[in-house]
């Protein structure tokens, strides 16, 4: 009788232990899947931030070129005005 009780207790203990291990393994797999999804999202965020930074640099470069061209056009206009002024022969 004592042997049967010991065997039943051992089986119950084994079932509880294996169930705990199974749940632990399932949780680890779920964590890995979640980590993969988060890494994918982080990769997309980093890519978008890089693209945004590149666009900002491109925009700044275009603005600098625009200002440079405007200054050049202004200086050309000033030269035209200077040379187109009638001179007073006094």
Image: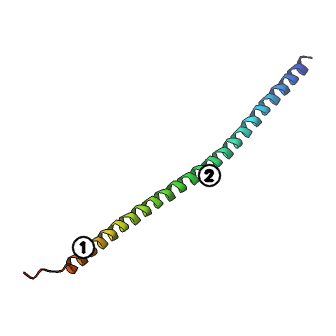
Residue 40 image point, x, y percent: 62, 52
Density class for disc 1 (Cα within 10 Å; few <14, some 14-19, many ≥20) is: few
Q: Nearer the viewer, residue 45 or 15?
A: 45
Q: Is 4 located above or below residue 29 in the figure? A: above
Name above or below for residue 23 compared with residue 7: below
78 lies left or right of 9: left
Give residue 17's quadrant in the image.
Answer: top right
Residue with the most extreme bottom position: 89
Q: Residue at x 28, y 74 (%)?
A: 77
Q: Nearer the viewer, residue 53 or 43?
A: 53
Applied colour scheme: rainbow
> Residue 1 — which label?
none
* Circle 2 crowding by C-alpha within 10 Å: few under 14, some 14–19, many from 20: few
The quarter of the picture where the C terminus appears is: bottom left
Disc 2 is placed on an element classified as helix
Q: Which residue is mark 1?
A: 78
């Amino acid at each position: 009788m004592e042997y049967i009780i010991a065997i039943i207790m051992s089986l119950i203990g084994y079932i509880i232990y294996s169930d705990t291990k199974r749940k632990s393994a399932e949780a680890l797999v779920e964590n890995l899947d979640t980590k993969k999804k988060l890494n994918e999202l982080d990769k997309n965020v980093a890519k978008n931030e890089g693209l945004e930074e590149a666009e900002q640099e491109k925009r700044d470069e275009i603005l600098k070129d625009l200002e440079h061209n405007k200054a050049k056009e202004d200086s050309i206009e000033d030269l035209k005005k200077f040379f187109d002024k009638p001179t007073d022969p006094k």
